[in-house]
Structures are given as structure tokens and as C-alpha cells.
Image (spheres, rainbow, N blue to C red):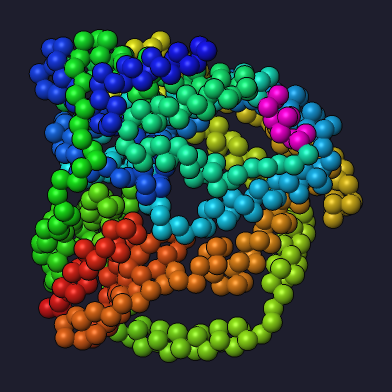
Amino acid sequence: MKKLLLLTCSLLGLNAFGQNTLLFEISGNGLETPSYLFGTMHVQDEAAFGWNDSVFWAINQADVAAFELDFDAKSLKKSIKPSKSQMKEWETFLVNDLRPSIENAIPADTLGERISSLYVDILKVVLNNDKNKRGTFVDLFLKEYAEKNGKEVVGIESVKEQLNIFLDMDKSLLKKDIMRFVEADDWNVDVAMIMGGQQDMVDAYSTRRLSDVCTYLTQQMEGQSSALTNSLYTRMFNERNAIMMKRVSKMIKKESHFIAVGAGHLCDNSGLVYQLKQAGYTLTPIDIVTKKSEDKVNWVSYSNDNYSVQVPSGVSEIDPADIETKEYMSYISGNVEASYYTTKGKAEFRIELVMNAHESEGYYDYAEEAEGVYDDYETEEVDVEEEATDAVEEAMEDAEAESDEVYEYEAELEQTDAQQEYEYSVEEVEEDYQYDEQPEVVEEHDMADYEYEEEEEVPVDSDYGSDMKRKKSGNSMKDAFENDYWRTVTKAVMGRAMAQMMGEAMKGTGNLTGDEDSIVEQEVVVMGETYKVVSETAYLGYTKTMLVETDNGTYELTISGDPMLLDSGLLDAFFTSFQLK
């Protein structure tokens, strides 16, 4: 009954603000310029990108774009590591509590078989080239667009704060849920749903109605009996919403912001929509459903000493040879300067001289020879699984023989990690966005804590392929899992997972779904001659490529990005406009 009342109040509150949207203008309460609030979803599903260009318009109106996190690679690297006290707590929990409970609950070979099955399912999802998914999730796509258009990008929260939600969870509740799962007769896990986002949630979000998202979340919690899940929900939404509200209020008073957070943070009485209204701001819904204009590309000329080509306005730095002052690729976003953004998705342009003239001749001779060898190979019957398994077993035997060197090397890595943890312990935060919470006390790391005890040799059971002595690493976590039980689990997991990967590699495909239509060829006329544009779905994404042979060598023209945009034909002038000088 209580949850029903909560749902009713939530929807009544939303009715006052326009529940048929995910985008709101924030005005009033002394603001000189309006800001904008948008509810996102952390998925790559094409259906989650169904909004119109009003979202781009809102970003362009603001001075600053604020997302839940700052996705900058440097910031992520500094913030990703837990504190020393957290690491110690988790080590104690895993070594002294969870590990022995698992060992007593399920045979090692059974656990290894079940985990290896999950590994294979995960591998299939990772290598599944689904053209209904974009190259990045909604938040990062909008962050890149904001950067492309010269907006300052900041994070509302730190990575450390989000990690702490899970690192500081009640470990007794976590153990209870883990053991319930481990002891179950059958591990019925939908890996695709977990990794790709629950389809029902995507469906609710794709309506672009906040009320549908909030209804879905409330219904999910109504049937939830896990104390751990309820605890996490409180921390992930109620507590974080309060912190977000405090920080967002300060941000929008200083300058105009585009605020993008998960749509769930806009729901019910703890959500930002209700809290901003209660604080005296006016929230005006903005239509994100009606298509306001057809996608039309504004083409401009890009040229250097060797060629000219047409690219969409705003696209630059497409040739690595033309770039001198900065790195060509960033850690997460690729080359934003060479990218083009529309509601249909993102496309990144690139032209590169991949082979000079003398290399080209040798390459094509080699390619023909290789194609003949491959044809011969296809006619032979090969037991892929058997060969892969033999290769895995041989690799694991070699790994056992080198175990002493591995442990010494890992000890050196741990010392290096300890030093890096010390170097990154002081987090840099922009002055305008200092958090009001109690400042974190940075513990001075005593490197002596990372010194290792004198190595002690312990026997290794000969059943595991070696009569050698294995040395203790001095790391209590590692040593605790160096027993027959966990070696059996590891061997089962690595054997099956590696056999699966090697098997697919031997078949000559990176697509486990068996899609035979991953390569499509299209003929175009360039400089009076016919060339082929090859569209290909591969592990690293979707691309369209054209090779142009010249007296100087071979130029490779590539557009990589989201299938809906690339398949629309809107960008094909990039290929047909190529002209040599």
C-alpha cells in the first residue's frame, strides 16, 4: 500500500511539470539565464536515442554541460582506485568470510563449469555486432557533442563517490545474496540483459515519457525482496539525489547549464524535478518527440597538398599526417574533431595513406596468395574445438612451468600499483565545483605496508601438472586463493573460455552470431572511375571504407560510427567527392 501511494504521489507530481518529456527548462527563482535538465539512460540501444534535435538545441543554449561523471580519461584514472581501508575491508571479507563459505557450498569443478558458461555467454554478447546498438551510450554521446561545440564539460559527482556506493555496501547482505545464487541448482542468468540493459526499461525510456520510466522503476521495486537491493536503491537514488540537488542548485545560479543525469534521478519526491520545483524554480517541459527538421548535411571542403574532399561542416583533422600539435585519438571518444553528430548518430571521418607505391604492389600479390591459401583451408575438415583445447592445455602447462617468474613479476607490479595509489591520492577538483561534503582526509601511504614477508615455499599438488615448489607472494588475498579448490576453478574457466575464443579465431570470424551479411559492397564513381565502398560490421564497430590506388600509393577513406547514420547515405559524398591534386 505504501508503495502504491508513493507511485500515485510521484505521478501526480509529474503531471504538474509535463510528464510527456525527459527535457525541462529551468527558470525563475532569480536565475538570469535558464538552464536545462535532461533524463538519460546508460545504454547503447538505438531506441534510447529517439529524441529530436531539441536536446542538441538545449546543449547549445547553455555555457556548461554537466553530467553525472566527468568522463575525462585523466580524471577517471585518478579516481578509479579504492582507498587503502576499503581494500583491507574487502580483502578480509573475501578471504576470511566469503571464500570458505563458497568452498563448503559447491564442488570446485561444478563452480568452474558454471562460471565458464557465463564467460562464454559474456563473450558472445561482447562480440555480437548488433546494428541496433550505437557505438557509445547516451550520456557519452551527448558529452562528445557538447565538447565538439565548445562547451565546458564537468561532472556533478566524482567516480569515487559512485564507487563508494558499492564498496561501502553491507557485506553481510552481499554474502547472503551471493550464497543464495551459488547454492541454486541452476544459474539462470540472462547475460545479454545484464550487459545490454533490461529491454523493458529501454522500452519505457524509448517512449520519451518520464512517467513511463518512473512507473517501470516503481514496479520493479514493488517485487523486490532482497534487503541488499533495497539498500542499494536508497543509496543510488534517494541519497545521491539529495547531493545532486545541492550541487545543481549552485551550478545553475552561476551560469547556464545543461544538466544530464539518469532519468531515474528525476522520479518521485526525491527526484530533481520535484526538488527543483519545491525550491522555487519553474520547470517547463520541452517537446523531444516531434521531428522539427530533416537531417541535412552542410558540406565544406577539406584539402591538403595531396587531395581535396568534402566533409560535413565542423569536421577537421581527418588525416593523421596533417596533425602536429596534439594527439590524434583520445582515450574514450576517438577523434572528436573529426566527428559529426546528428540525431541519427555519430560518424568519424579519416583519410590515410596506408601504403606507398612499392608497398602496394607487394601487398596485392600477397593478398591474392593469401586468398588462395584460405580457399584451400576452407576445403579441409578441421576439428576446431579439439585443436583449440589442445592449444589451451599446452599454454596452461607452459604457464605452470613459469610460475615462479610470474609470482615475482606480480610482486613487482603490486609495488608499482602501491606507488601509483599514493601519487593519485590527491584529487584535483575545479574551484567552482568544490563539493560541500566533509573533505576527504587523504591518508599518507606508508610504503612499508606494501613490503612483503619473506617468501615461503609451499608444495603444489602434483595433480595440477607440476612438482615444483610454489612461493608465497606475501599477498594474503592471492595466497588465500592459491589452493587446489581455486586452481580447479581457474583451470576449468580458462580452459573453456580460451577454447571458445581460439575456436572462433580458427573459424576466421569475430562474430559469434554467425551473421554472414556483415560485409556489404557498394560501387561509386570517383574521379571518373568505379570504386567499391565496403560496409563492414566488426568487433570495433561499424565502418564504410574505400581504397583509392594512386601513383603515390593507396589512400584509405573511412567513416566509422553508428549504423543508422552511415546506412542512411547522407555521408556518401565524402567518398564520391575525393579528388587528387
- Is residue 114 placed above or below 456 in the rendered structure? below
Picture quarter containing residue 97? Answer: top right
Q: Position of residue 392 (x, y in %)?
A: 72, 62
Task: Using residue 524 as the reference point, say whether residue 184 is left or right of it.
Answer: right
**Which quarter of the figure is the C terminus placed in?**
bottom left
Q: Position of residue 43 (x, y in %)?
A: 42, 42
Q: Position of residue 524 (x, y in %)?
A: 24, 79
Can I make out residue 480 in this image? no
Instruction: Residue at 76% x, 24% y: name it.
Output: 96
Foreground residue among 482 and 12: 12
Counting the numbered discs, the total is 0
Question: In the image, which residues are magenta?
Answer: 175-184
Foreground residue among 471 and 568: 568
Foreground residue among 202 and 558: 202
Picture quarter containing residue 512? Answer: bottom right
Q: Position of residue 84 (x, y in %)?
A: 57, 23
Magenta span: predominant SS is: helix
Instruction: Residue at 27% x, 10% y: name it.
Output: 278
